[in-house]
Amino acid sequence: MNAVQQSIAAGARNYKACEHIGLSVRTYQRWGNNGDNIREDARKTRVFVPVNKLPLQDEEKIIAMMNSPEFADKSPHQIVPILADRGQYIASESTFYRVSRRHQLLTHRHASRPAKTVHKPKALIAERPNQIWSWDITYLATSVRGQFFYLYLFIDIFSRKIVGWQIFEEESARQAADLITDICWRENIAKHQVTLHSDNGSPMKGATMLATMQDLGIAASRSRPAVSNDNPYSESCFRTLKYRPEFPSQPFDDLNAARTWVNGFVTWYNTEHRHSAIRFVTPEQRHGGEDKAILAQRKMVYQRAQMENPARWSGDTRNWDWIPKVSLNPDKSTERKSV
């Protein structure tokens, strides 16, 4: 207060003198009116040193201890109890953490690899068949306990058609490469036409498979590790396959039996199964472009029924509109727009 008064007496402006010491003019006036009743400095900018501040020598002890060979791979949660067992107390766990954070000692402290930040795969949108495929491998039990056959299955996410499949006795990038080459030939796929989505299994990321995809001009899309939701179309198809009433209750005796059953399933799935996500048309109809006419016919049937007996309808007819886009791992903004 004396310093402000001296500055004002020397010709300084009130607000400038107060601003220099972090005080508002109103606060200066209030303190001046209170006279000797002011007991402490209540400025927000004051430098306050707590009475229980950790001494510098103790802070240096914490830093040395955190960097010592004995505790280099341990967190303060472990260090403090160990010191207590030895009859030592330097500071609390929160103080250990505060000092470590200030000196950047809270990095990964174990020999294991640090956890990686894995981002959600890029959202993909299919607007026509043979634009985005999804594939995966599932196990089929055999009559030999502990041994399995491996079903490689490729599905078009726009039409839900199974564009290719095969069963092998082992997982192999070479076999996957041969299968994708055959599928591209049968579907007449041009270079840079298809994006292939999969998880991070060894057959998907094997050198032979990657080289073949590069030669065919197929772009790769990957799921996050251990996140099955990133590959929902393949997972959903596998569930349909294994929960069919016809799915054998007993394991497959040989490779031929497994291939025969899956061949029948794929024929049913593509040509007979009316898929709920594509307005209950078959994948083959949508893949071939026949679904537009089918859905338009259904819409006319419902509209005619509504005109003939309007009392039975309290609102719009069932939605038989054609679905123009199918998304794979859409962003939240894309999901809100679609809704």
Image (tube, rainbow, N blue to C red):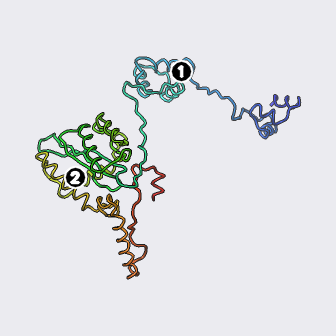
Give 138 or 67, whichever is nearer the viewer: 138
The earlier-in-sequence mark between 2 and 1 is 1
Could you tell me how far apart the alpha carbons at marks 2 and 1 are, in whole angstroms?
Answer: 62 Å
Q: Residue at x 45, y 54 (%)?
A: 335
Q: In the rendered image, which quarter contains the C terminus?
A: bottom left
Q: In the rendered image, which quarter contains the N terminus?
A: top right
Residue 119 lies in what quarter of the image? top left
**Is residue 143 at least partly visible in the picture?**
yes
Rendered position, 147 above or below 57:
below
**Is residue 223 at least partly visible in the picture?**
no
Image coordinates of residue 62 in percent, x first then y, are 50, 21
Q: Amino acid at mark 1?
A: Glu
Answer with left or right where residue 69 lies relative to residue 203: right
Badge count: 2
Instruction: Kindly identify which residue carries mark 1.
Output: 59
In what element is the residue under mark 1? helix
Q: Amino acid at mark 2?
A: Lys
Instruction: Kindly identify which residue carries mark 2.
Output: 242
Q: Nearer the viewer, mark 2 or mark 1?
A: 2
Q: Residue at x 37, y 47 (%)?
A: 193
Rendered position, 105 above or below 19:
above
Number of residues whose C-alpha sits closer than 10 Å to that of mark 1, classed few (under 14), some (14–19) or many (20 or more): some
Number of residues whose C-alpha sits closer than 10 Å to that of mark 2, classed few (under 14), some (14–19) or many (20 or more): few
Residue 169 lies in what quarter of the image? top left
Image coordinates of residue 189 in percent, x first then y, are 33, 48
In what element is the residue under mark 2? helix
Answer with left or right where residue 116 lies relative to residue 38: left
Image coordinates of residue 167 in percent, x first then y, are 19, 45
Image coordinates of residue 39 in percent, x first then y, are 73, 33
Answer with left or right where residue 42 lies relative to residue 339: right
